[in-house]
Amino acid sequence: DTGVSQNPRHKITKRGQNVTFRCDPISEHNRLYWYRQTLGQGPEFLTYFQNEAQLEKSRLLSDRFSAERPKGSFSTLEIQRTEQGDSAMYLCASSLAREYYEQYFGPGTRLTVT
Amino acid sequence: SQQGEEDPQALSIQEGENATMNCSYKTSINNLQWYRQNSGRGLVHLILIRSNEREKHSGRLRVTLDTSKKSSSLLITASRAADTASYFCATGGGSEKLVFGKGTKLTVNP
């Protein structure tokens, strides 16, 4: 399977703990995106990378959130000092860098903060 | 914040009927895309329509775009039970990110 993969698929953590998620994009895609989706809502943009450069961050991405894409391949999203409001599905997507592009989404990581 | 607003929020139809979902957005766009999300799964891209296009077809899907009204519609013809899912419109503007609406939950009854 050469789609976007995300690990872990589910994460339960206690408030105050740090968590890290990983996303492996489609290999030839140089753009990688992170979105967050809560129940009954559409995905909300968090940040995106072109190769290893982080080019845009949403205001949703507080200083407790950090994302990296060190070699322009896989990416990690870390949430420090988790809060109950961080409970959501975290979606990763990738695409080619061209004017009109569709994004290919991974299955997501469901985070539950207790 | 979300730009798109899908209408209706939920739609229930019988197999074989057509389903129409609408999307309205607020700012100027470069393109508009429709995605499908099955329960508990990731989003799947369905169709992309550019801002200078008015209509596009893909299999049983027909998308229209009216930039003067800032609205789009997705028509699924001859629906099947497997079409049961949530459908989201997403707009692409000057930035590379997509801005999604809240979605329409479609149920196709066998």
Image (cartoon, grey):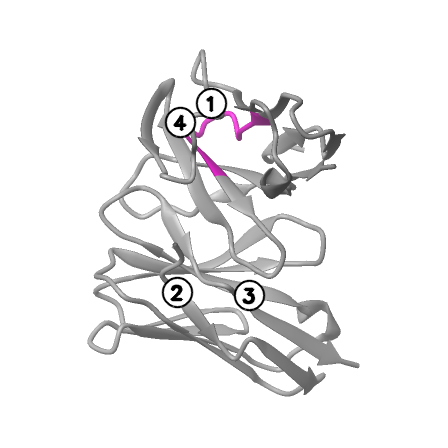
Query: In the rendered structure, which amino acid carries the disc numbered 1?
Result: Ser
Label 1 close to label 4 by CB (< 8 Å): no
Q: Secondary structure at mark 2?
A: loop
Place of residue B11 in the rendered image (x, y in percent of width and height, measured from the top left)? 61, 81
Work out how far the residue at label 1 is from the one at label 4, CA to CA, in angstroms.
Answer: 19 Å
Q: Which residues are magenta?
A: A23-34
Q: Earlier in the sequence, mark 1 or mark 4?
A: 4
Work out how far the residue at label 4 is from the one at label 2, CA to CA, in angstroms.
Answer: 27 Å
Q: Chain of mark 3?
A: B
Q: Is residue A71 left or right of residue B104?
A: left
From the image, state whether disc 3 or disc 4 is nearer to you: 3
User: Where does label 2 land, which residue?
Assistant: B4
From the image, state whether disc 2 or disc 3 is nearer to you: 2
Picture quadrant where residue A97 is located:
top left
From the image, state whether disc 3 or disc 1 is nearer to you: 1
Say whether mark 4 and mark 3 are on the same chain: no
Q: As rendered, which of B36 and B103 lies closer to the eye? A: B103
Label 2 close to label 3 by CB (< 8 Å): no
User: Where does label 1 land, which residue?
Assistant: A66
Q: Chain of mark 2?
A: B
Where B107 falls versus A26 (above or below)?
below
Q: As rendered, which of A18 and B33 lies closer to the eye? A: A18
Say few, some or many: other residues with alpha carbon within 10 Å of mark 1 (under 14 / 14 to 19 / 20 or more). some
User: Where does label 4 land, which residue?
Assistant: A30
Residue located 37% across and 21% down the image:
A51
From the image, state whether disc 1 or disc 4 is nearer to you: 1
User: Where does label 3 land, which residue?
Assistant: B87
Where B97 falls versus B44 (above or below)?
above
Query: In the rendered structure, which amino acid carries the disc numbered 2?
Result: Gly
